[in-house]
């Protein structure tokens, strides 16, 4: 017997975003990012750097498999955070989502400019197959299609927004299915369905190139 979670928000009342709620906590990522954007607060930026540098490095290793490029990505991504923090909008998502989106885009830029390979990146390296619930990369899977980084990015952009959001939460932010469902405020079953459809479409697009 399933039970619905009751909300204290009156029916028809505007919903407060998770990011806006988190911003009420002065130590939250959102509050720190707003402080950087509004006041160029170096102490807030240093805290964000401490919280995100290791995760950005891990993302760099997933996408480039190169330690030096991953270290460079940390510096360049966080510099971009410092420069673009005034553009952060609480109503459009969490600070973590915003920072990781900047990081992913910066990583693709670095790969293009450096002309380094993987000149090709496997679709599985970015969005692996759904397996036993963890988000570990699937390396050297037999039959994996390799495509240029720019193509992977265009394929990803071609997915429906709901499927992109789920894939980003699971494979870019390394969240569990339960955590991602909570962040996106959707049922777990809906999340799993969108994840299967999104990854399936991505593989189809890669396979037709």
Image (tube, grey):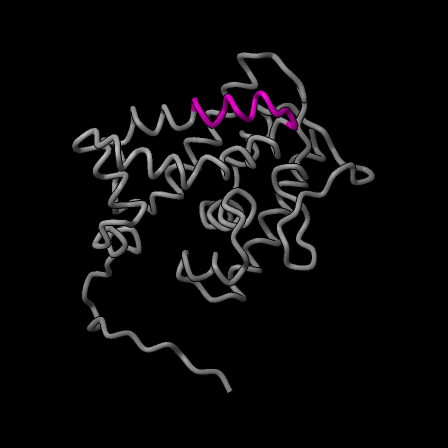
Name the residue at 50% across, 39% down: 55
Q: Position of residue 144 (x, y in %)?
A: 76, 36
Magenta range is 65-76
Name the residue at 52% across, 18% down: 110
Q: Residue furthest bottom?
A: 1
Q: Position of residue 179 (x, y in %)?
A: 48, 59
Where residue 139 sits, quadrant-wise, is top right
Seen in the picture, residue 120 relative to 14 is either above or below; the reply is above
Q: Nearer the viewer, residue 70 or 150?
A: 70
Where residue 132 sits, quadrant-wise, is bottom right
Seen in the picture, residue 169 relative to 179 is either above or below; the reply is above
On-image quarter of the C terminus: top right
Seen in the picture, residue 143 relative to 78 is either above or below; the reply is below
Q: Is residue 91 magenta?
A: no
Q: Position of residue 18 (x, y in %)?
A: 30, 56
Left or right of 30 in this view: 105: right
Left or right of 7 in this view: 10: left
Where residue 124 sits, quadrant-wise, is top right
The prevailing secondary structure element of the residues shown in magenta is helix
Left or right of 49 in this view: 58: right
Left or right of 64 in this view: 19: left
Name the residue at 61% across, 32% down: 61
Q: Nearer the viewer, residue 118 or 189?
A: 118
Q: Nearer the viewer, residue 109 or 42?
A: 42
Name the residue at 55% across, 16% down: 112
Q: Position of residue 177 (x, y in %)?
A: 54, 59
Q: Is residue 66 magenta?
A: yes
């Amino acid at each position: 017997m399933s039970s619905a979670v009751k909300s204290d928000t009156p029916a028809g009342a505007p919903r407060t975003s998770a990011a806006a709620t988190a911003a009420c906590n002065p130590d939250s990522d959102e509050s720190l990012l707003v402080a950087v954007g509004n006041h160029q607060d170096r102490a807030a930026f240093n805290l964000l750097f401490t919280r995100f540098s290791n995760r950005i490095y891990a993302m760099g290793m997933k996408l480039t498999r190169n330690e030096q490029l991953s270290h460079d990505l940390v510096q360049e991504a966080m510099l971009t955070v410092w420069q673009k923090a005034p553009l952060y909008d609480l109503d459009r998502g969490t600070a973590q989502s915003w920072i990781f989106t900047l990081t992913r885009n910066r990583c693709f830029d670095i790969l293009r400019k450096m002309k380094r390979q993987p000149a090709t990146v496997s679709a599985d390296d970015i969005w692996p197959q759904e397996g036993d619930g963890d988000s570990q990369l699937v390396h050297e899977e037999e039959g994996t299609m390799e495509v240029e980084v720019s193509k992977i990015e265009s394929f990803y952009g071609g997915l429906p927004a709901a499927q992109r959001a789920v894939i980003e939460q699971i494979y870019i932010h390394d969240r569990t299915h339960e955590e991602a469902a909570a962040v996106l405020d959707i049922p777990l079953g809906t999340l799993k369905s969108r994840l299967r459809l999104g990854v399936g479409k991505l593989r189809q697009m890669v396979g037709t190139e």
